[in-house]
Every structure is written in structure tokens, then in C-alpha cells.
Image (cartoon, rainbow, N blue to C red):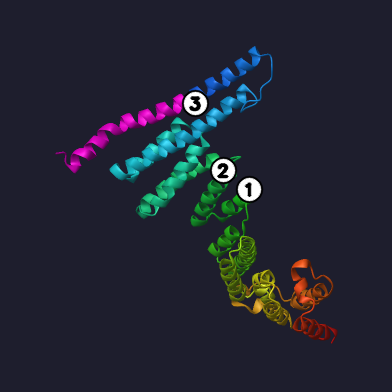
């Protein structure tokens, strides 16, 4: 009867053959694909017609084949690196990865995938070796920092940026941000924080947090609408409650806290419940807004007259809309006495 050690040895003995087989299959697949494409055009020429194929010309076919080969190469070599690290340690796995990059120096997918795979393991190494490995990875990422692939470019610039910050090379870090193909607020905030410039760091952190909070609200409102469209009322009401809590916790305009609940109320066509939610919504619009008093946004300059008077402006706009633009989905409110009383009360409030 074979022991566990026997099976482990068998795996070790057969792995090289398995890896060669994977590479052979990948190569055969690409060769076959190219042969089929060539045959496609031969048949088209024989029939004297033009038949639209999966590619426009032979050069494009080779380009697609090369891209597929790049992806297969990336996957196979990542598996190899993982196997070597598990069996022989990080150093040997890292060196093997560098060898693969030297063998295929223009394969961006390979460099990107190996970099992403190796980074999480760096933290497990000693401080001395971490620095060495990061410098080696930086050399690889420098090759792909101008990639036309957005994800590859983002990963490369991000790694180089944080490495420069760690080494207190702040000018080099800042220079990278001009090429970063996405929002840079958090990266710039990190740079200010590293330089002990805490005021601008807080402004950027808080600005981004406000943006994220508003985006989350929009997503929750949209999910509520989808749930209502699919007749998942319980889901819609739970999402509406989460959206209300989010708005209140983040101290965003309180009136927005009832947006999703109003969607649920209108969907129900329950005049009493709808009037109750509208009453809460309109009441939240009274007074002035001072979002900068919230500890989450205390560094943002949001206290000018236009911002502070925004709730009153919104209230006026909503009252006018409710008076003159009752759409089909809200027509059930027209004859409701509580709703009419609500309109009169807030109309008088705005006239003061």
C-alpha cells in the first residue's frame, strides 16, 4: 500500500512532464486556431466570395493568437512560481519569476500577474529581504508603467508610488500621479500624510469619503428600485432602511435619507404611509445645513451661504413639484386630505 510520502514523491516526479504537457496543449491550441483561420480564407477564396470571419486579416489573427499565448503563459508560470514557493521557499520562487520575465521581457501580462501574485508574500519576509524584493519588483513595474492596458498601468504606477513614499522620495511619487489613469485623491492624501502635511491630507480623505458616501446612497436607491420592479418588497424595504441609516451616519443632507423609503411608499400606493414619509422628508429640509460641523467632514469648506441654504431651496422645489407635477404613480395622493394639508403647511412656511 502506497504511503502519503509515495504520493508526494510521485507528484514531484510527474510535475515537469505535466508542465510540459500544459505548454504543449497551449501551443497546439494556438497552432490549430491559426490553421483554421487560414483554411477559412482559403475556402472563401475558392468560392469567390467574401466571408466575414472572426478576424479581419492574418495580422489580426496572429495578434489574437499572441494575446492568448500571453494569457496562457501568465497562468502557467504563476502556477509554477506558486509550486516552487511552496516546496523550496520564497527566494527560489522569486528568482524563477525573474527568470521567466527575462525569457519573455515584453510580456506585460506575465510581469503584471507575477507582480500581483508575489506582493502579498513580501510581508512574510524579513525586513531586509522585503526591501530587496521590492526593488526587484520596482524594476519590473517600471517596464509596464506606460502600458496601454489600464489595469496593468494602474497596478504598476500604484506600486511605484507607494514605494517612493516609503523611501521618502516624495517628488518622484508626486510625478507619477500625473499619469495615473484613475482618481488620485487617496494617493495624494497619503503623500501629504507621509510628509506630515495633515490639513491637506484630511481635506482629500474627507472629500473622497463624501464622494463614496454619495455613490453608496445612489447604489442603494437603485437597488431599492430594482427590488420593487421585481416585486421583492421585503428586500426593497430593508435596502431603504440601510440607505436611511447611511445618510444619517455620514451626515449627508438628511432629506436624502428618505429617498429610498419614498420609493417604497409610492410603490405601495398607500396614501397614509406616503404622506408620513413625505412629512419626514419635508421636515428634514427646514433650517440651514452645516455639514462641516460633522466630525467626518470638519476640514471641508462647505459652510458658504449657497450650501447652508440648499435645504430650503430643495424644499421650495419639491413643494412646487408636488403641487403641479403629480405623475401617474403618485396620482393617488391628489385627493388625500393629509397630503393637501402638508402642502399648505410647507407652502406657508416658505412664504415667511
C-alpha gap between disc 3 and disc 2: 28 Å
Q: Residue at x 33, y 40 (%)?
A: 84
Which residue bears the numbered disc 1?
179
Depth check, front residue: 164 or 226:
226
- Is 121 on the left-hand or right-hand side of 304? left
Select label 1 or label 3 by which is in front: 3
- Could you tell me which secondary element the residue under label 1 belongs to? loop
Mark 1 or mark 3: whose residue is earlier in sequence: 3
- Could you tell me which secondary element the residue under label 3 belongs to? helix
Which label sits on residue 145?
A: 2
Query: Considering the image in quadrants, where does the N terminus appear?
Result: top left
* Magenta residue span: 1-30
C-alpha gap between disc 1 and disc 2: 9 Å
Depth check, front residue: 179 or 211:
211
Q: Is residue 10 magenta?
A: yes
- Could you tell me which secondary element the residue under label 2 belongs to? loop
| x and y percentages locating residue 314 in the rendered image | 77, 74
Which label sits on residue 30?
A: 3
Quick check: marks 1 and 2 in contact, CB under 8 Å?
Answer: yes
Q: Residue at x 69, y 20 (%)?
A: 50
Quick check: marks 3 and 2 in contact, CB under 8 Å?
Answer: no
- Is 272 on the left-hand or right-hand side of 103? right
Amino acid at each position: 500500500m502506497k504511503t502519503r510520502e509515495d504520493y508526494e514523491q510521485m507528484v514531484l516526479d510527474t510535475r515537469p512532464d505535466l508542465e510540459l504537457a500544459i505548454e504543449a496543449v497551449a501551443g497546439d491550441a494556438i497552432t490549430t486556431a491559426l490553421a483554421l483561420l487560414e483554411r477559412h480564407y482559403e475556402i472563401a477564396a475558392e468560392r469567390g466570395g467574401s466571408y466575414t470571419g472572426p478576424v479581419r486579416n492574418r495580422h489580426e489573427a496572429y495578434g489574437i493568437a499572441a494575446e492568448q499565448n500571453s494569457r496562457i503563459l501568465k497562468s502557467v508560470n504563476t502556477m509554477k512560481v506558486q509550486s516552487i514557493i511552496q516546496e523550496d521557499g520564497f527566494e527560489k520562487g522569486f528568482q524563477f519569476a525573474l527568470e521567466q520575465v527575462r525569457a519573455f521581457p515584453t510580456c506585460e501580462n506575465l510581469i503584471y500577474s507575477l507582480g500581483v501574485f508575489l506582493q502579498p508574500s513580501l510581508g512574510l519576509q524579513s525586513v531586509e529581504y522585503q526591501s530587496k524584493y521590492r526593488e526587484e519588483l520596482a524594476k519590473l513595474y517600471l517596464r509596464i508603467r506606460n502600458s496601454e492596458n489600464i489595469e496593468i498601468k494602474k497596478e504598476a504606477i500604484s506600486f511605484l508610488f507607494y514605494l517612493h513614499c516609503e523611501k521618502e522620495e516624495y517628488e518622484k511619487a508626486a510625478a507619477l500621479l500625473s499619469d495615473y489613469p484613475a482618481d488620485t485623491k487617496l494617493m495624494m492624501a497619503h503623500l501629504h500624510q507621509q510628509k506630515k502635511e495633515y490639513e491637506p491630507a484630511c481635506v482629500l480623505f474627507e472629500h473622497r469619503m463624501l464622494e463614496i458616501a454619495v455613490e453608496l446612497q445612489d447604489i442603494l436607491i437603485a437597488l431599492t428600485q430594482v427590488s420593487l420592479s421585481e416585486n421583492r418588497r421585503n428586500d426593497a424595504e430593508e435596502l431603504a432602511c440601510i440607505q436611511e441609516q447611511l445618510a444619517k451616519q455620514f451626515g449627508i443632507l438628511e432629506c436624502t435619507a428618505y429617498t429610498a423609503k419614498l420609493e417604497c411608499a409610492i410603490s405601495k400606493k398607500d396614501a397614509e404611509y406616503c404622506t408620513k414619509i413625505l412629512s419626514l422628508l419635508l421636515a428634514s429640509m427646514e433650517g440651514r445645513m452645516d455639514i462641516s460641523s460633522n466630525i467626518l467632514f470638519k476640514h471641508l469648506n462647505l459652510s458658504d451661504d449657497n450650501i447652508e441654504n440648499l435645504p430650503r431651496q430643495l424644499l421650495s422645489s419639491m413643494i412646487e413639484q408636488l403641487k403641479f407635477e403629480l405623475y401617474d404613480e403618485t396620482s393617488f395622493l391628489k385627493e388625500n386630505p393629509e397630503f393637501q394639508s402638508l402642502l399648505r403647511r410647507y407652502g406657508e412656511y416658505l412664504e415667511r
